[in-house]
Image: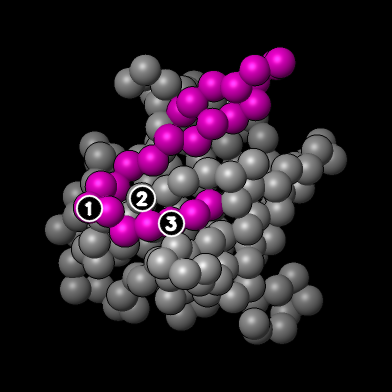
Amino acid sequence: MIRHLTVASALALTLLLTGCSSMKLEQFQGTTPAFDLTGYFEGQTWAHGIFESRGGEIKRQFRVEIDGYWEGEEFVLDEDFVYDDGETDQRTWRITPTGEGRYVLRLPYGDSTIDVAFDDWMIRRSENVVINRATVTKFGIRVGEVTLFFTKTDPDGEAS
């Protein structure tokens, strides 16, 4: 499955989107290390995450292996997911700077698909770690939240 993601600007790369009601962009201005989406995700990255329902119930837990690289003018993220129930998924994101900031993810749903919108905050905690919190909405209604912890260190402890 191929997903298209647009990225606004260097400021929007610091915190991909600014719609979370409890966080403000100003809280993170001037913090270090600065977050550069393509700089951080180029090469191998690993993540662990959860999806929580609107009521706060953890619905899914997962692990992701990510390969980030440039392909012409697009930055590509190839992601391989393994969920706690053994299900696997593969996603490919093609990121093109455009001046927008939000994105829509088309997810399998029964025999069809549904589109959900993401409002992402990516906070760089160190050279190695990024914390991602995303609010997921459908028709403008919050359906859940995704929390991810990204690292440039593989599960065996070797830096990429």
Judging depth in this view, the residue of 19 and 116 nearest the camera is 116
Read off the residue under disc 2: 6
Instruction: Tell whether position 59 is magenta.
Output: no
Judging depth in this view, the residue of 105 and 18 nearest the camera is 105
- What's the residue type where badge 1 is placed? Gly
Which label's residue is closer to the chain start, 3 or 2?
2
Q: Is residue 156 left or right of residue 2?
A: right
Q: Quick check: 111 above or below 81?
A: above
Q: Label 1 to label 3, Cα distance in Å?
A: 12 Å
Which label's residue is closer to the chain start, 1 or 2?
2
Classify residue 14 by image quadrant. Answer: bottom left
Can I make out residue 50 in this image? yes
User: Which stretch did the figure color magenta?
Assistant: 93-116
Q: Secondary structure at mark 3?
A: strand
Q: Is residue 74 left or right of residue 149?
A: left
Q: Quick check: 109 above or below 77?
A: above
Q: What mark, if any, has residue 99 been given in the picture?
A: 1
Crowd band around label 3 with a 10 angstrom C-alpha radius: few (<14), some (14–19), many (20+): many
Q: What mark, if any, has residue 95 been given in the picture?
A: 3
Please report contact status of discs 1 and 2: CB closer than 8 Å, yes or no: yes
Q: Label 3 to label 2, Cα distance in Å?
A: 5 Å
